[in-house]
Amino acid sequence: MFEVLVAGVAVLAGGIAAVAGFGIGSLLTPVLAVPLGVKAAVAAVAVPHVVGTALRLWRLRAHVDRDVLKGFGIASALGGLTGALLHGALASPPLRVVFGLLLLLSASAELTGWARRVRLGRTGAWIAGVLSGGFGGLVGNQGGIRSAALLAFPLEPRAFVATATAIALLVDAARMPVYAVTQGGAIVDAAGLVGIATAGVVLGTLGGERILGRIPTVWFRRLVALLIAALGVYMLASG
């Protein structure tokens, strides 16, 4: 039954990520943490995450905003690597509470219209990228805070998801060697669950892609903000 639960959550996670640009780590990590523990779960989820992200990027590659990717994206990858390196030493419940509050603040800014009045320059994009990547790496959940920061850029839905996906793949490339060294044995031990989760994420990604093209931009941004708020509430509760 647990394997069925993992498969179902993985399909849902892949679908949400295809629509909002994040969600695989947010949904799968707490499920896999039950048998594996949090640290091993974060590393194990990185495998279906990188597979689903690579598939999503391949199918949306023509919509990537290269300017945002070169500034915010590279900075986010660097911050993500730093956060992953410090994850074991600094991760703590109070940090998750702060993370949750930041997500709720970002969601509120979008839903109230304040975020649409903010435009990040080159320096601001680098700062936002480093902070969001680093903070996400510390708590093992980078997608939500990255999408929250990306709401400050005027991107249409496909460009938003494609750019978030390209950044996520950069972050995965930066953190996977760290997880391979620190949690490689745990990932191998959980190979069965990792395989089920990966297959589910792929199916969810293909299904969610069909929904993305049907969502108007204004409703898309509100949907992303609501998903970010839900993640913020979860972070507060778990912290």
Image: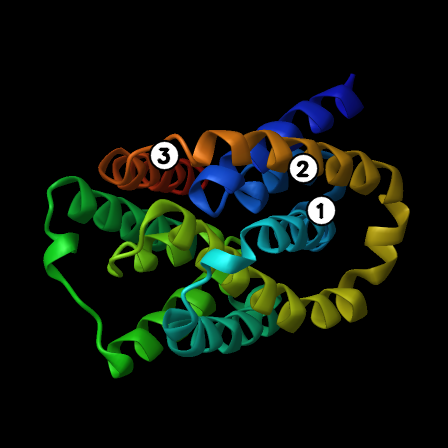
Q: Position of residue 145 (x, y in %)?
A: 38, 55
| Circle 1 Cα neighbour tier, 10 Å, few/some/many (<14 / 14–19 / ≥20) | many
Q: Earlier in the sequence, mark 3 or mark 1?
A: 1
In-image side of 190 versus 227 (left or right): right
Quadrant position of residue 173:
bottom right
Q: Please tell me whether residue 21 is drawn above or below residue 75 in the rendered image.
A: above
Left or right of 119: which side holds 36?
A: right
Label 3 or label 2, whichever comes before in sequence order: 2
Q: Check the picture and name the quadrant holding the N terminus.
A: top right
| Residue placed under numbered mark 2 in the picture | 201
Residue at the image position 88 percent from the left and 38 percent from the top: 192
Whether label 2 touches label 1, CB < 8 Å: yes
- Point out which mark residue 48 bears: 1
Q: Amino acid at mark 1?
A: Pro
Quadrant of the rendering where the C terminus is positioned: top left
Q: Residue at x 24, y 58 (%)?
A: 154
On screen, residue 215 above or below 87: above
Circle 3 residue: 230
Left or right placement of residue 164 versus residue 157 in this view: right
**Rendered image quadrant of residue 209:** top right
